[in-house]
Image: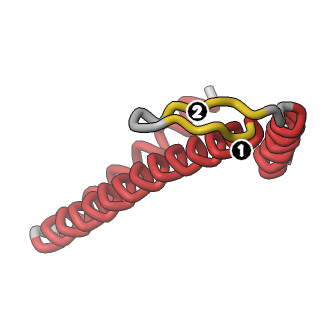
């Protein structure tokens, strides 16, 4: 059910915006800084919603790209650290300590 929440809310929002835009069809004067023009309010509303969606999507894509780049860097760093630990024979000790600490935490939870 969690995966269906976002699409349902998006559909409801699109319907509300469409109804709002269709109700407002009267012409309005729009100032473009360098000129003014008269256009239907429905186009102004729909264009504004479209631009807002594009800007939000672009910002989200930039964030995802940065997170993926950071994730790759951290994975390569993790691999390098594991290689150094294996080279010095410490990898087995780290796994053993990790298993012991998880076993201790399980024992503490049972008490």
Q: Is residue 10 left or right of residue 29?
A: right
- Above or below 62: residue 10: above
Query: In the rendered structure, are the residues bearing label 1 and label 2 in contact, judged by CB atoms less than 8 Å apart?
Result: no
Position in image of residue 67 (x %, y %) = 38, 53
Between 55 and 85, the one lying in front of the other is 55
**For the point 74% across and 39% down, which residue is it?**
40
- Above or below 50: residue 23: above
Q: Is residue 110 left or right of residue 69?
A: right
**For the point 58% across and 32% down, which residue is it?**
30
Residue 93 location, quadrant: bottom left
Identify the image quadrant of the C terminus.
top right
Which is in the foreground here, disc 1 or disc 2? Answer: 2
Between 81 and 77, the one lying in front of the other is 77
Crowd around label 2: few <14 · some 14–19 · many ≥20 (10 Å): some
Q: Report helix, strand or loop for mark 1.
A: helix
| Residue that label 2 marks | 30
**For the point 39% across and 58% down, which residue is it?**
65
Between 54 and 103, the one lying in front of the other is 54
Between 19 and 11, the one lying in front of the other is 19
| Residue that label 1 marks | 43
Crowd around label 1: few <14 · some 14–19 · many ≥20 (10 Å): some
**For the point 41% across and 33% down, which residue is it?**
33
Position in image of residue 86 (x %, y %) = 18, 71
Residue 28 location, quadrant: top right
């Amino acid at each position: 059910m969690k995966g269906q929440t976002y699409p349902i809310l998006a559909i409801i929002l699109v319907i509300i915006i469409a109804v709002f835009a269709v109700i407002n069809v009267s012409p309005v004067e729009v100032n473009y800084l360098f000129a003014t023009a008269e256009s239907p309010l429905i186009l102004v509303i729909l264009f504004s919603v479209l631009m807002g969606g594009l800007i939000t999507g672009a910002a989200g894509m930039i964030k995802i790209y940065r997170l993926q780049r950071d994730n790759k860097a951290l994975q390569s760093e993790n691999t390098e650290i594991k290689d150094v630990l294996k080279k010095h024979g410490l990898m087995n000790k780290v796994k053993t300590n990790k298993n012991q600490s998880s076993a201790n935490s399980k024992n503490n939870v049972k008490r």
